[in-house]
Amino acid sequence: MSTNRQIVRATPDQVWQVLADGWLYPLWVVGASRMREVDEHWPEPGAKLHHSVGSWPLLLDDETEVLAAEPGVMLELQARAWPTGEARVTLRLHPVGRDTEVVIEEDADAGPARIIPAPLRQPPLKWRNVETLRRLAFLVEGRVAKASARPS
């Protein structure tokens, strides 16, 4: 299991607002390149994001499904990216004063990536999720700054 942490200068609810907007997924998830559809009940359990992974012209259409969700606290996903396989991804939001510590845990769950030994599988996941959390922080903090700059 690869685990990464990032402090985001926003409340857990402000972070959740970004996680709850499935159309923003390719803006913060490394590897997701475009959204094709977001189920209306996203991010409730069973809801899916229909996305593409890769770079044009080598795009593969796939999906990510919500396994569990607790608004402002936790989001557990089954991310599919075949032919490499599937991954279980859990995002946890912990308040730290006025900020939020976002913890992401990820590991291959099915498919060819699962047969790669964990010591070889974990470093690329860790690197990928450093950037994923960095992008998430930029997106959330940018939205918070923009909202606070609006005149009342």
Image (spheres, rainbow, N blue to C red):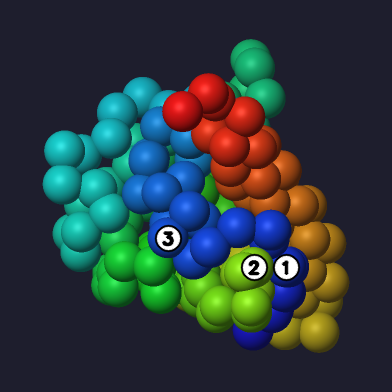
Of the image marks 3 and 1, the number of the one nearer the N terminus: 1
Residue 8 x, y percent position in the rendering: 68, 61
Secondary structure of residue under mark 3? helix
Q: Are marks 1 and 2 in contact (CB under 8 Å)?
A: yes
Q: Residues within 10 Å of mark 2 (few under 14, many from 20)?
A: some
Hey, what amino acid is under mark 1?
Answer: Ile
Residue labelled with disc 2: 99
Mark yes or no: residue 38 visible: yes
Could you tell me which quadrant the N terminus lies in?
A: bottom right
Q: Nearer the viewer, residue 64 or 20?
A: 20
The image shows residue 112, relative to residue 142, as above or below, that is below
Is 58 located above or below residue 8 in the figure?
above
Which circle, 1 or 2, is nearer the viewer? 2
Image quarter for residue 127? bottom right
The residue pinned by badge 3 equals: 13
Q: Is residue 45 left or right of residue 148?
A: left
- Between residues 18 and 112, which one lies in front from this camera angle? 18
The amino acid type, in three-letter code, at marker 2 is Asp
Instruction: Name the amino acid, label 3.
Output: Asp
Spatial CA distance of label 1 from label 2 is: 7 Å
From the viewer's perspective, is residue 12 above or below residue 118?
above
Name the side, left or right, on which 152 lies relative to 32.
left
Is 24 on the left-hand or right-hand side of 36?
Answer: right
Q: Which residue is mark 1?
A: 7
As drawn, which residue projects farthest toward the top?
Answer: 57
Q: CA distance from mark 3 to mark 1?
A: 14 Å
